[in-house]
Structure formats: structure tokens, C-alpha cells
Image: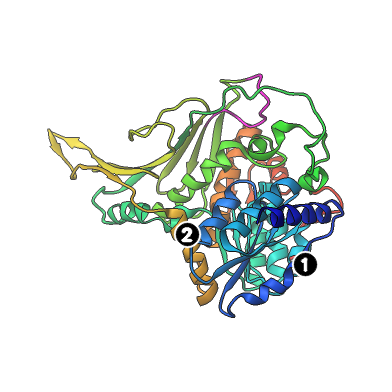
């Protein structure tokens, strides 16, 4: 087995170095699967995409036929891991467009940096593939709107990786929320007061790591010299590729606010904050931010603090969460716990106190299983592309309000900021040639 692995590794690395997908050497193995096997591929194999794929493959009747990434060494490592685990080596690609030519593929997982999501998702839909796309679905509101149009035009099942939508833990909390025992919900708060963020020092530009196709990693983003701070997980703190904590943890918690309140889009938003804790670090996005949204019949406050390690209402430190504040009490929830804190009037509880209820199952596993079921049934998944769009919308509007320093009024029917014309310049990205926005 060791000699075979060495041979395969050398063969894969040589093919990748030449820019040649190893499709002909692997295609024969694809015939070994039963006709009803759901065959998938993963684009972006570094972090959350890898977790999504492995969660999905826990389900019987599934197989991974292909992997795609710009990092040839990591790509080879992942291919070997899957071969060892399942006895079948996936085909490897650098270019997602070549991967999408595989007719036997039913669906693809997209786990790339945010600035790539729109291109890859719309290409996949056009190629007739169902899609599981990581959150936020896009790095701009305009792209998010395009992705909704693409999913509906090509009639594809698209599951967005906001997996709390499938988590029994959140479902049980929302059953209580929907019971009406809290009375009218007048305000919702959500937070990400995380324990990381220190030591993100500025470093000089350098050569890209061996085996990394950096120009393809940049894709539609502005041409820049390679800098390790902008690569892998910390890409999230640069506007070219993502939106900081707001579009990372924020999208998960914002989505739960929208789900709990049955809401879609705010009427207005204003934000204050900045690089207040670490003004001289490498990040562009704020380490401290408070954003206030008007949803008409309730207000919503989002807060984020890097290197804070606190959690309002709940005991788990550094665990982002949501609190629904009602007339009679407060429902507080994060991924680990939910509880009810009653309001008190004249020494009496206005609703029952519920001690911490602990999560007992994997929300991610439930979410990928739901995706599999919907591929087969053609029903809408638990987190539709519209839900992904709405969560991304709220997050991006918060960031735009911060970047402009303006209170912004939002018209969701036009997908337009109505009171600050210049702020609309943030809605649509400018792609670097030869990449182009999908046209509906």
C-alpha cells in the first residue's frame, strides 16, 4: 500500500504541475458505484469545505468523485485521505470549470474564500449540478442576488452552509420562542465576542507557497503580491475577499435572528466601530463593531469584539449567540446551550425560568443529510439560497454602514440603498479580467 501511495502521489503531483486533471486515470473507478449513489465533488479543500464533505460522506449511498483546489500539495493530501478512507481516489483539478464537465457528478460543495462563491455557484448551476455553498453565499449583495436568480433559472437544489437551520438544538429553542410565552419580542441582540485576534502583525509580501497557484486563488479579486496574512483562514479580514467577523460568525447568528423573527430585510441600518483594540495590526476589517438595524416591528443589535472572550446571557465564553428580548423574558441561545431568563414584576416571574438546555447532536451532520435528501426528492432544503441571500444582505449592509459612516435606508424590492447614492458603490464588485459576473 505504501509503494502504491507513493506512485499515486507522484503521478498526481506531476499532472497538477502540468495543469492536467487526472481524470482519465480515475474515470474507470467511477463505474464501481451503484446507479443510485449520489456523486459529489468539493471545490476548496482547506477548512470548512473539507468538514462539509466529510459530514456528507457519513451518509450511505454517497461518494466523492473529485476535488479541486489551487494548492496542489494540500489537494494531493486530501485525495490520499479519501482514498485511504473509502478505497476510491477522487479526480483532482485546479480549475473548477474542468471539474464541472464531469457528467456523472450530481452535486458540488463550495468551500472557497467568499469572493469565489458567486462564480463557482453560478457555473455549477449552469452545468446542471446541485450545490452546497458555504456562507456567506457571496462577498457582495449584487452577487447574492445573482445567485438566487441562477438557482431558480436552472432549477437546482442549493443548500447554504448556515447549518443551524437543521440543528435540533435551535429547533427546540425556536419551539419555545414560537409558543408566545415571551410575549412581544421588542429587540433581538446577537454577538461574536471571540477570544482570538491578537498578534495579527503586519508581515512583508513574499512568494506564494510551493504548489499554490496564487493568481487563480485571487481570481476576480484585485491583483496583489502574495502576503500570508491574506491567505487561508485570515483572508476573512480583508475586504477583497470577505467581510471580517460580520460575514463570518455574523452570518450564522444573523440568520438565526431572521429565522426566529420570520424576517427578511431591514428598513435601515447604522454602525459604529473600528480597529479600536488593534489599530496597527494587519486587518482591514473592524475588531470592534456595533450595528443597529430597524426591522419595523423590532430592533436588532449586532456586536462584535475581537479578543474579548465574553458572552452576554450565557456561560460559554467566546461562543457567539442570539438573545430574543420579550415582554416576559429573554430567550438566549448559542450552539451549545439555550435558556430562558424571566422578567420580574412585583417579585413575580412573568414566565417560567428554563435552566440551560444543552445541544446533543451535530447540526452540521443534520444539514448535510438534509442536502442529500433534497437532491433525491428535489424539495427545497432547510437553508435555501434565498435564506442565504437574506443573511448575507444583513451582514453586508452592516459593513457598508460602517465603511460609509452613514445611516442607510434599504429598499429590498429594488435591492438598493435609497438615501445615500454613493453607498450603492459597495453593492456590486468589480471583477478582475478575465473573470466576469454571471448574467441572468
Q: Which of marks 1 and 2 is nearer the N terminus?
A: 1
Residue 385 visible from this viewpoint: no
Q: Measuring from the top left, give residue 195's x and y in whole percent.
A: 48, 28
Depth check: give the residue in front, 191 or 272: 191
Question: Residue 268 is drawn in which quadrant?
Answer: top right
Return the residue at label 2.
367
The circle drawn on residue 221 is none
Of residues 36 and 311, the one drawn nearer to the viewer in this rendering: 36
Q: In this view, does 410 lie to the left or right of 127?
A: left
Residue 116, x across and y down, in percent: 71, 51
Tell me where residue 190 sits by quadrant: top left
Q: Would you place residue 409 above or below residue 27 in this image?
A: above
Q: How crowded is mark 2: few (under 14 residues within 10 Å), some or many (20 or more)?
A: many
- Residue 181: give x, y in percent of width and height: 23, 51
Residue beneath the point at 81% across and 46% down = 213
Q: In which quarter of the image is the C terminus?
A: bottom right
Task: Give the residues drawn in magenta, as a range.
Answer: 279-289
| Left or right: 59, with 404 as reference point | left
Q: Name the residue under label 1.
A: 25
Q: Residue at x 72, y 69 (%)?
A: 126
Amino acid at each position: 500500500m505504501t509503494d502504491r501511495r507513493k506512485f499515486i502521489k507522484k503521478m498526481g503531483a506531476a499532472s497538477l504541475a502540468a495543469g492536467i486533471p487526472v481524470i482519465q486515470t480515475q474515470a474507470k473507478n467511477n463505474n464501481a458505484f451503484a446507479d443510485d449513489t449520489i456523486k459529489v465533488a468539493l471545490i476548496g479543500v482547506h477548512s470548512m469545505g473539507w468538514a462539509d464533505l466529510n459530514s456528507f460522506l457519513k451518509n450511505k449511498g454517497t461518494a466523492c468523485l473529485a476535488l479541486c483546489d489551487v494548492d496542489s500539495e494540500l489537494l494531493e493530501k486530501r485525495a490520499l485521505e479519501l482514498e485511504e478512507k473509502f478505497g476510491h481516489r477522487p479526480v483532482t483539478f485546479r480549475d473548477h470549470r474542468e471539474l464541472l464537465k464531469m457528467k456523472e457528478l450530481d452535486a458540488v460543495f463550495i468551500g472557497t474564500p467568499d469572493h469565489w462563491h458567486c462564480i463557482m455557484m453560478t457555473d455549477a448551476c449552469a452545468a446542471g449540478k446541485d450545490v452546497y455553498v458555504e456562507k456567506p453565499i457571496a462577498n457582495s449583495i449584487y452577487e447574492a442576488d445573482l445567485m438566487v436568480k441562477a438557482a431558480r433559472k436552472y432549477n437546482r437544489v442549493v443548500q447554504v452552509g448556515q447549518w443551524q437551520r437543521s440543528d435540533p438544538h435551535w429547533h427546540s429553542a425556536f419551539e419555545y420562542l414560537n409558543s408566545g410565552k415571551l410575549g412581544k419580542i421588542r429587540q433581538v441582540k446577537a454577538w461574536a465576542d471571540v477570544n482570538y485576534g491578537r498578534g495579527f502583525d503586519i508581515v512583508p509580501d513574499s512568494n506564494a507557497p510551493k504548489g499554490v497557484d496564487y493568481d487563480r486563488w485571487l481570481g476576480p479579486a484585485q491583483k496583489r503580491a502574495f502576503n500570508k496574512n491574506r491567505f487561508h483562514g485570515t483572508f476573512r479580514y480583508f475586504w477583497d475577499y470577505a467581510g471580517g467577523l460580520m460575514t463570518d460568525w455574523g452570518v450564522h447568528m444573523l440568520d438565526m435572528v431572521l429565522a426566529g423573527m420570520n424576517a427578511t430585510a431591514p428598513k435601515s441600518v447604522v454602525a459604529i466601530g473600528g480597529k479600536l483594540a488593534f489599530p496597527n495590526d494587519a486587518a482591514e476589517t473592524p475588531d470592534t463593531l456595533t450595528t443597529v438595524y430597524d426591522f419595523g416591528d423590532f430592533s436588532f443589535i449586532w456586536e462584535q469584539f475581537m479578543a474579548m472572550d465574553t458572552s452576554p446571557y450565557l456561560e460559554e465564553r467566546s461562543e457567539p449567540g442570539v438573545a430574543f428580548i420579550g415582554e416576559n423574558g429573554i430567550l438566549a441561545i448559542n450552539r451549545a446551550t439555550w435558556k430562558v431568563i424571566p422578567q420580574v414584576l412585583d417579585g413575580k416571574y412573568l414566565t417560567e425560568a428554563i435552566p440551560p438546555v444543552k445541544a446533543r447532536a451535530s447540526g452540521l451532520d443534520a444539514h448535510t443529510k438534509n442536502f442529500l435528501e433534497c437532491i433525491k426528492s428535489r424539495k427545497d432544503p432547510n437553508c435555501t439560497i434565498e435564506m442565504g441571500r437574506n443573511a448575507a444582505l444583513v451582514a453586508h449592509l452592516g459593513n457598508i454602514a460602517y465603511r460609509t459612516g452613514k445611516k442607510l435606508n434599504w429598499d429590498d424590492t429594488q435591492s438598493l440603498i435609497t438615501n445615500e447614492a454613493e453607498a450603492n458603490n459597495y453593492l456590486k464588485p468589480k471583477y478582475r479580467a478575465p473573470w466576469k459576473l454571471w448574467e441572468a
